[in-house]
Amino acid sequence: MAAQKKPAVDAVLVGFGWTGAIMGMELTAAGLKVLALERGEPRNTHPDFDYPRNTDELSYGIRGQLFQNLARETVTVRHTPGDVAVPYRQLGSFLPGDGVGGAGVHWNGHQWRVLPDDLRLRSRTIERYGSRFIPAGMQLQDWGVSYEELEPHFDEFEKVCGTSGKAGNLRGQIQQGGNPFEGARSNDYPLPPLASVNSALVFEKAARELGYHPFPQAAANASRPYTNPHGAQLGPCNFCGFCERFGCYNYAKASPQTTLLPTLMQRPNFELRTRSHVLRVNLAADGRRATGVTYIDAQGNEVEQPAELVVLCAYQLHNVRLLLLSGIGQRYDPATGKGVVGRNYAYQLGGGASLFFDKTQPMNPFVGAGASGSVIDDFDGDNFDHGALGFIGGASINCINTGGRPIQQTRLPAGTPAWGAGWKKALKDNYLYTASVGSQGSVMAYRDNYLDLDPTYKDVHGQPLLRMTFDWKDNDLAMTKFIVGKIEGIARAMGPREYTIALKKPGDHYDLRAYQSTHNTGGAPMGTDPSTSAVNRYLQSWDVPNVFVMGASAFPQNFGYNPTGTVGALAYWSARAIRERYLKQPGALA
């Protein structure tokens, strides 16, 4: 049966999470008729996240009600190009979102700006350490955009989110109590930091005594009532402990639903179609222009949607897969190092410590928020001298108390029985007195860590699954060994009764089974050289100029932070280029 054909629109957005909502706001404000296609369910704060239904750990934390259904589509994973990839069938390592709001619904709210030097990591490394410092097979790249160019867009996204925090570098002046390593910002955060829980206070004291520079984690969890520039109202966070994996019933955590959709959904030139799974971007005969997309609608019909502009706003993995399925850009070949789509897949590597205090130091872990805590940045990026250390990159180190949910967030000392009376007694004795210190470590891009289409496995629509080839490298393991050494020093200084360390060691391989982070990056890297980047500095496809690709798929390598703040800033940066340049003269912007 031939595909149904819908009336043309000016712009079609594929995916409707953070970047889809941002692009919807920006392009409708420019007068375009905009259609968003979201393959998942419609969701809003009310009624979907109403209390008490959202505090159901079994439904959301364990069964993943807000996550991608892996029975319909997943990825296959292997460690090296010579291995056979197998499907990711049970949610563990990362948790792609599904439905309106995407992963922007279930994130914790850690909101970061990328370090200025991370945007020019290759240049910075060569300037400071020489080109020989870069290991063979590591594909460091500059992003092609500067911190100064992105700064107004970081500021805009923070105001939209009602971010709570403390500036560390305000217009070039270092501010007491903030992050002294951050790039200069034009304004302080719109809200003061969240209140500090006890574990953060103990961490902060220990870190200061060791000569470090602790500061409150910037949080997209409102510390006060707030009205954002679009008139959306956020309530103050009540530290319920149900941020990660959950929607926010209190309108306190920034998400597309709480910050942008109340305005966007009222605009007459915007339309959202849910349960609409995009199969491919359609191209003209010469392959140089997109004519729209083809998708499967809620009734199972194949639909052709013509559009003048196509913006991929899905999750990182899905953006890359859609480029590959559509034949946009040259596929990456690790054997030759040529090609750009699928190149530079990266992730993050963390380590940490679980701390157990005596009864004079209650931590009350049930009082928490997604981003309530304290952080140090002394060992992130190139904030410290790597010359004698032999690795590139670093990590932010944090003491964040996201909550004390009984199934997933219980910590027990080493040697505790796995079940029975001994397990119950240990849980009773330790629950109120636990804390953790963790890290988010950068992972560089390597020639043989990449994404392509699996030759064997297909999704429910008969299309090849995305195949991930990825493993930890010596640089990653050396970095995390160094970082965990710093974590252990802080843990000891915090004065626990005992503590345990979690650390990847030489010879360890990437393991899908345990949750690590939903911070997958790369696969469609940005840059200024079309031989090493899939999109230019404005996130525009080099090969098909009326296709733009949002999100963390554009990161040339990964850094030691959550990606969302940078993803949001890049979306505003790209939207500005579309509005001020592309719409006036469609074509290549770089």
Image (spheres, grey):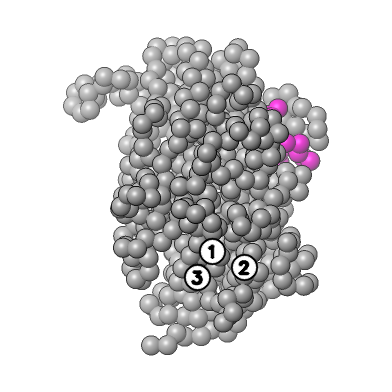
Quadrant where the C terminus lies? bottom right
Give the spatial CA distance, label 3 vs label 1.
11 Å
Magenta stretch in the rendered image: 179-190
**Where in the figure is residue 90, as x and y percent of width and height?**
31, 50
Whether residue 77 sits left or right of residue 43 in the image: it is: left
Q: Which mark is residue 254?
A: none
Q: Going 38% across and 69% down the picture, which residue do you hit?
A: 463
What residue is disc 3 on?
326
> How busy is the neighbourhood of tag 3: few (under 14 within 10 Å), some, or many (20 plus)?
some
Give the spatial CA distance, label 3 vs label 2.
12 Å
Of the residues under marks 2 and 1, which one precedes in the sequence?
A: 1
What residue is disc 1 on?
330
Q: How many marks?
A: 3
Quadrant where the N terminus lies? bottom left
Q: Give the structural element (helix, strand or loop) at label 2.
A: loop
Question: For the residues carrying marks 3 and 1, which lies nearer the camera in this image?
Answer: 1
Whether residue 238 sits left or right of residue 1 in the image: it is: right
Q: Is residue 12 magenta?
A: no
Check the image and report above or below for 309 versus 155.
below
Of the residues under marks 3 and 2, which one precedes in the sequence?
A: 3
What residue is disc 2 on?
543
Give yes or no for contact between labels 3 and 1 (Cβ–Cβ under 8 Å). no
Q: Give the structural element (helix, strand or loop) at label 1.
A: loop
Give yes or no for contact between labels 2 and 1 (Cβ–Cβ under 8 Å). yes
Give the spatial CA distance, label 2 vs label 1.
9 Å
Check the image and report above or below for 505 versus 267.
above
Check the image and report above or below for 48 versus 430.
below
Q: Going 47% across and 52% down the picture, which residue do you hit?
A: 334
Asked whether the viewer can see residue 19, the reply is no
Q: Going 30% across and 20% down the picture, which residue do you hit?
A: 414
